[in-house]
Amino acid sequence: MHAVAFENVTKTFRRHAGRELLRDRAAKLLKRPPRETFYALRNVSFSVPRGESIAIVGRNGAGKSTLLSLTAGLCRPDEGRVIVNGRVAALFELGSGFHQDLTGEENLKLNAALLGFSRRRAAELFDEIVEFSGIGDFINEPLRTYSSGMVMRLAFSVAINLDPEILLVDEVLAVGDAAFQEKCFDRIHRFRHMGKTMVCVSHDIPMIEKLCHRAVWLDHGEVVMQGAAAEVLGAYTGRTMAAQAGA
Amino acid sequence: MSGRAESGVPQGRSGEQSGSAGVRAASEPAWNGDVLFLMWSLITKDFKVRYRNMSLGVFWSVLNPLVLMGVLTFVFTQIFPNPTPHFPLFVMCGLVPYNFFVVAWISGTTSLVDNAALIKRIPVPREAVTLAAVLSNVLHLLIQIGLLFGLVFISGLSANRHWIWLPYIWAMEIIFVCGLSLASAALNVGIRDMRYVVESANTVLFWAVPVFYSFSMVPQRFKELYQYNPLAALILAMRTILIDSAPPRWELLAKLTFSSLVVFGLGAAVFARIKPKFYDYL
């Protein structure tokens, strides 16, 4: 049983999509310009068996974040199928629902509701989340008095406590100080040992090698290579090094 | 790569067809949390954020309509004298529904764009964001209705049994604003000047609903049409109940209910249709 599977997934974005004013719309009705489409992902297929961890690597703009957004159900593919079996928690752009004027506690509860906790569960986990974040008495202060590291710690602590079956991680493991990072890794290792699935995007190759079984290498929205983490990452780092040497 | 051969195909069908070919596994919705807790959290967040940094806080919601009531009363009793009895109360019966309508519709309209970071990162039900933005104005409304009751007693009138209609007519009004907001919020994602369309519509409405003039002055041929506007219907019902101490007429209630439910249905349909494109446009 696959936890996550992409079958020939294509996702396009229209250039200059959104932020259009009425006059642009009106102008378009009169003369239809050719639609410029941009392929964020092109015919991508891969699957992650339950209990495995997969890394997505590639340069900036390769389509990694789009892939995670599709997995999280934030958008839909234009072509192909995205299959997800299990409760997903996404650790990316942590603190998206946070508000500067609310206290840590208020933000924590709001974020818990946004991520899908029930009222009871949020109340049960409250102490544990605060404890894990190490925020201490600051929990009753407005968020604008927090350092950016503290905000990230709070956000990470809420998300990791959601107890998901599938964890999506986007470059957020560089959260907080060394001690807190240690705690995060510990938590993610435990998560893996519980037989849960992880999809991980990062530029930190040594870290990915430690965390993931398999890897997919994306370039300009297409799969260049996929397979065992060591092989793919070896080829990927070889290529980037060669590109740097060539330049 | 093997995909290249097919890559020309999706051009024309992107967007529209995402319902058939590109569905996620339907068995597993992306977000299966506690909707009531979510709504409550979003509503209280909006309310706290709005009032936390104001020294007079909630008092603004009392002060603002009182000032407008004072000005309108001065103009329409001193400059253009008119025979309407209990004029301050009469104006307030128009202002409170109108103010709620304007503020709630604007905050509903901009809700999705204001919460773009949320929409793009967390698969919360999108409807909840817009509905919570509208409903967060309800507490504010309750305070203003309290003010209106105070004014009833100051005017020498008293509570009567027809007040039991008030929750019903207000519920219809809220349903109406929710429907309008669902449509305008979704449209605002793709067409960003929707906000100004809404603001202009509100200006027109201030004159087109009987806020400071009486329904009896409206020419006969417009009267029928007038009552299909839920905002006008609400104001008329409020005056009948609070000033005339009479029950609202059933035709008026029927029109109010009909228009509100139809608008809500249409709004929800527009929202559902545009929803799959939110991610791309925000």
Image (cartoon, coloured by chain):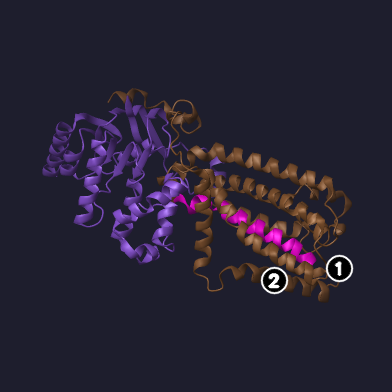
Chain colours: A purple, B brown
Please report, as a chain letter, where disc 1 is located: B
**Residue type at mark 2?**
Leu
Above or below for A77 versus B199: above
> Residue B66 shows which numbered tag?
2
Q: Amino acid at mark 1?
A: Pro
For marks 2 and 1, give the CA distance.
18 Å
Q: Position of residue A196 (x, y in %)?
A: 29, 35
Q: Is residue B19 left or right of residue B152?
A: left
Residue that appears at 49% across and 42% down: B125
Q: A110 or B64, which is in the foreground? A: A110
Q: Earlier in the sequence, mark 2 or mark 1?
A: 2
Where, quadrant-wise, is the N terminus of chain B in this rendering? top left
* Residue A123 on image: x %, y %: 42, 51
Specify the quadrant of the image occupied by residue A10: top left
Front residue of B12/A145: it is: A145
Residue A20 seen from this side: no
Q: Which residues are magenta?
A: B89-116
Is residue A203 visible to us here? yes
Q: Is residue B105 magenta?
A: yes
Q: Residue at x 29, y 37 (%)?
A: A199
The chief SS type of the magenta part is helix
Q: Which disc, if any, is residue B85? A: 1
| Residue in the picture at 74% in, 65% down | B149
**In this image, B260 relative to B90: left or right?**
left
Chain under label 2? B
Q: Position of residue A97 (x, y in %)?
A: 42, 53
